[in-house]
């Protein structure tokens, strides 16, 4: 069925359940990126960290929906939520085929790496927010991020190479 046929047959009702669900473990961030509403509007909107009780309500609902993908991110820094690894394990225990998150990576420590790997997380995406240390600093209100990130990556994997496009 092509797009025109789909639109001709559309009756205003969404059929089926979503294949991708986004859950925001934290709607706050540790950075102040100038291009991100989470950073720009940090004091203008009621933001916080999702409670375990709220997450458990969502989990009950997800059992019926059975999405293909769950993304633990929607603008905030997910690793600010101390329950993030529990959340990942619970989603995987439901049989969710693909669980991913997005992070600025600033809160990830050496100790957290094994937790990330053992949690069952399928994908982790890192937002670099700049192609140089100066641009990153300008965009996020931070300094020495790239240099510190490289040190962290090299301590984890001495053979790490960085490719910039």
Image (spheres, rainbow, N blue to C red):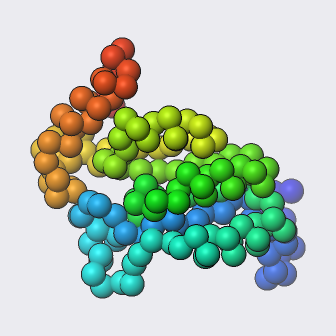
Residue lying farthest to the front in this orientation: 111
Front residue (pair 111, 117):
111
Q: Is residue 146 above or below residue 77?
A: above
Query: Dividing the image into 4 quarters, which one contains the N terminus?
Result: bottom right
Residue pictured at 14% horizontal, 42% vertical: 144
- Residue depicted at x 80% and y 75%: 14
Q: Is residue 42 visible?
A: yes
Query: Where 158 falls versus 82 (above or below)?
Result: above
* Residue that protrudes farthest toward the top in the picture: 159
- Image location of residue 130, percent across then percent down: 25, 45
Q: Decide if residue 137 is on the left or right side of residue 101.
A: left
Residue 86, compared with residue 112, is above or below; it is below
Give the percent coordinates (x, y) of residue 33.
26, 61
Q: From the image, which quarter does the C terminus lie in?
A: top left
Residue 6 location, quadrant:
bottom right
Which of the pair 165/26 is nearer the observer?
Answer: 26
Q: Position of residue 83 (x, y in %)?
A: 52, 60
Q: Nearer the viewer, residue 5 or 12?
A: 12
In the displayed structure image, the side of residue 63 where residue 128 appears, left or right: left
Residue 32, image quadrant: bottom left
Q: Is residue 96 left or right of residue 74?
A: right
Q: Is residue 75 visible?
A: no
Residue 71 horizontal/vertical position (percent): 59, 56
Depicted 50 relative to depicted 122: above or below: below
Q: Residue at x 50, y 35 (%)?
A: 114
């Amino acid at each position: 069925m092509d797009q025109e046929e789909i639109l001709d047959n559309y009756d205003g009702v969404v059929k089926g359940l979503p294949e991708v669900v986004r859950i925001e473990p934290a709607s706050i961030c540790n950075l102040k990126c100038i291009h991100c509403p989470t950073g720009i509007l940090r004091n203008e909107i009621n933001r916080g960290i999702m409670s375990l009780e709220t997450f458990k309500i969502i989990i009950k609902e997800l059992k019926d929906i059975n999405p293909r993908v769950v993304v633990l991110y929607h603008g905030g820094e997910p690793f600010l939520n101390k329950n993030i690894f529990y959340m990942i394990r619970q989603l995987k225990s439901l049989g969710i085929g693909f669980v991913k998150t997005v992070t600025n990576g600033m809160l990830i420590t050496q100790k957290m790496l094994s937790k990330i790997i053992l949690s069952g997380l399928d994908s982790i995406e890192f937002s670099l927010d700049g192609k140089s240390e100066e641009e990153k600093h300008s965009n996020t209100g931070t300094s020495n991020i790239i240099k510190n990130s490289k040190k962290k990556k090299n301590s984890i994997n001495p053979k790490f190479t960085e490719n910039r496009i």
